[in-house]
């Protein structure tokens, strides 16, 4: 489970662990020391995040907008003042360093050309109006990384959209909860009614936000992979143990050929996911940005997770039909939860069809789909 999807009582505990990790410089370990990191290499970060996912350490920043998306994006596109102000705050593990990312709107998900939220310059400020939706963590965030139209007279998004940082304590902001399939309030509707922010909160150039959005999305798609891998390995180990210890007609499930075949397939997929992840780390450690590979990893990690959840549900059989918190749930209801939450992960950070479009265009050289 990603941190953003945790229930309120777990969230508080996560924050307390984040603080401890931050004190060691581990929360954002790949960042330069001046911004609160430890200058860790890509390899070190990958290993750390995979192991943190395996041991299910809360508060490691997994799936958190600030550490995974907005901080790294600010590192690339923010000015020095913005870096000095926001990066150490994110890396400190303080609740004031929590961010949300607001791209999606009721009529604009995959297609950013349809973004309607506006930020109109008025003297030294921008005045923001509009609505976002599915904004993870908006109810906990202090800062919002907002995609909005700064020139509504131009329809093409690459000439009219900007990224603006919004203080979530600003007057005129309303968040309304949306509860996910697993019954957790993780995302929100977010309304802006004449919200005023300083013009200095613009990131990069006005009307050029689209050119930041694409790398920011690649960063977002990459940021979850080691965690999904580590957590997938953990669930595999749990399933293997369950298959060894559970007997059917006098035989352990692990002796059943179908069960063995499915577990072997899932193990191979997890190994493949790791290889994909390490290939990207290698590319980045040679100074290159990953292109289509971020889409490939996002898509593949969704498929690996789905297959793992389905295999798990098949192995635990009829017990998979009870609610995850029922006393009859096997393996603490983890497989049911995974199955339910993965449905959303298929869409988060771009749907599987959008990832395939990216691969078609940038790996195979196919023409743009629209
Ligand atoms: C768990 C979760 C967390 C999220 N968190 C955030 C968040 O923090 N911030 C945020 O801004 N958004 C967030 N989202 C929203 C997410 O980014 C969108 O759901 C996603 O971009 C898809 O947009 P949409 O739902 O409007 O679907 P649409 O774009 O309307 O797509 C509907 C269907 O059409 C398909 N489709 C659309 N265009 C194409 C195309 N060109 N080619 C092929 N198929 C296409 C899609 O794949 C999809 O199946 C979150 C979503 C989930 C589920």
Image (cartoon, helix red, strand yellow):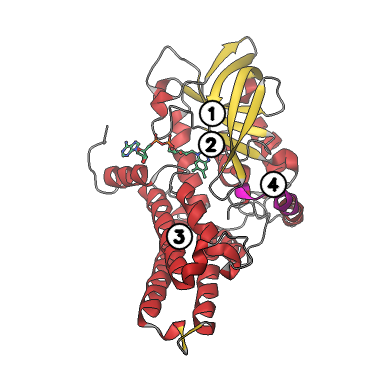
- Determine whether the beta carbon of the residue marked 1 sits less than 8 angstroms from the nearest atom of ligand 1: yes
Report which residue position mark 4 lands on. Answer: 91
- Residue 189 visible in rendering: yes
Q: Nearer the viewer, mark 3 or mark 4?
A: 3
Residue 275, picture quadrant: bottom left
Mark 4: secondary structure? helix
The reply to whether callout 4 and callout 2 are in contact (CB within 8 Å) is: no
Between 296 and 71, the one lying in front of the other is 296
Residue position marked by numbered label 1 in the rendering:
132
Instruction: Determine the CA span between mark 3 and mark 4.
Output: 29 Å
Q: Tell me the SS state at disc 2.
A: loop
* Residues at discs 1 and 2 in contact (Cβ within 8 Å): yes
Q: Residue at left 65%, top 26%? A: 174
- Label 4 residue near ligand 1, CB within 8 Å: no
The answer to whether marks 3 and 1 mark residues whose Cβ atoms lie closer than 8 Å is no
The answer to whether the residues at label 3 and label 2 have Cβ atoms under 8 Å apart is no
């Amino acid at each position: 489970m990603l941190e953003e999807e945790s229930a309120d009582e777990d969230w508080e505990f996560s924050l307390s662990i984040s603080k401890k990790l931050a004190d060691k410089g581990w929360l954002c370990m790949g960042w330069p020391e001046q911004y609160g990191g430890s200058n860790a290499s890509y390899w070190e970060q990958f290993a750390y995040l995979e192991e943190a996912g395996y041991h299910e350490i809360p508060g490691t920043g997994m799936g958190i907008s600030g550490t995974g998306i907005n901080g790294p994006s600010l590192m690339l596109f923010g000015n020095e003042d913005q870096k000095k102000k926001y990066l150490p705050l994110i890396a400190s593990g303080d609740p004031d360093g929590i961010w949300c990312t607001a791209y999606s709107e009721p009529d604009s998900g995959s297609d950013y050309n349809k973004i309607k939220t506006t930020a109109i310059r008025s003297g030294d400020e921008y005045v923001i109006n509009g609505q976002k939706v599915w904004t993870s963590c908006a109810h906990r965030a202090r800062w919002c990384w907002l995609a909005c139209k700064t020139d509504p007279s131009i329809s093409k998004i690459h000439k009219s959209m900007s990224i603006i940082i919004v203080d979530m304590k600003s007057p005129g902001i309303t968040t309304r909860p949306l509860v996910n399939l697993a019954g957790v309030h993780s995302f929100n509707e977010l309304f802006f009614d004449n919200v005023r922010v300083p013009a200095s909160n613009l990131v990069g150039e006005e009307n050029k936000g689209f050119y930041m959005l694409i790398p920011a999305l690649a960063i977002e798609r990459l940021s979850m992979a080691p965690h999904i891998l580590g957590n997938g390995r953990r669930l595999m180990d749990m399933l293997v143990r369950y298959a060894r210890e559970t007997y059917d007609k006098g035989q352990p499930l692990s002796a059943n050929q179908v069960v063995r075949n499915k577990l072997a397939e899932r193990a191979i997929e997890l190994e493949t996911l790791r290889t994909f992840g390490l290939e990207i780390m290698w590319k980045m450690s040679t100074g290159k940005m990953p292109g289509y590979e971020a889409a490939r990893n996002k898509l593949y990690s969704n498929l690996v997770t789905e297959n793992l959840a389905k295999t798990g549900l098949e192995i635990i059989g009829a017990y998979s039909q009870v609610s995850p918190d029922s006393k009859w749930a096997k393996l603490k209801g983890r497989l049911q939860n995974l199955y339910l939450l993965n449905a959303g992960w298929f869409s988060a950070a771009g749907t599987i069809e959008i990832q395939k479009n990216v691969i078609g265009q940038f790996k195979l050289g196919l023409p743009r789909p629209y």
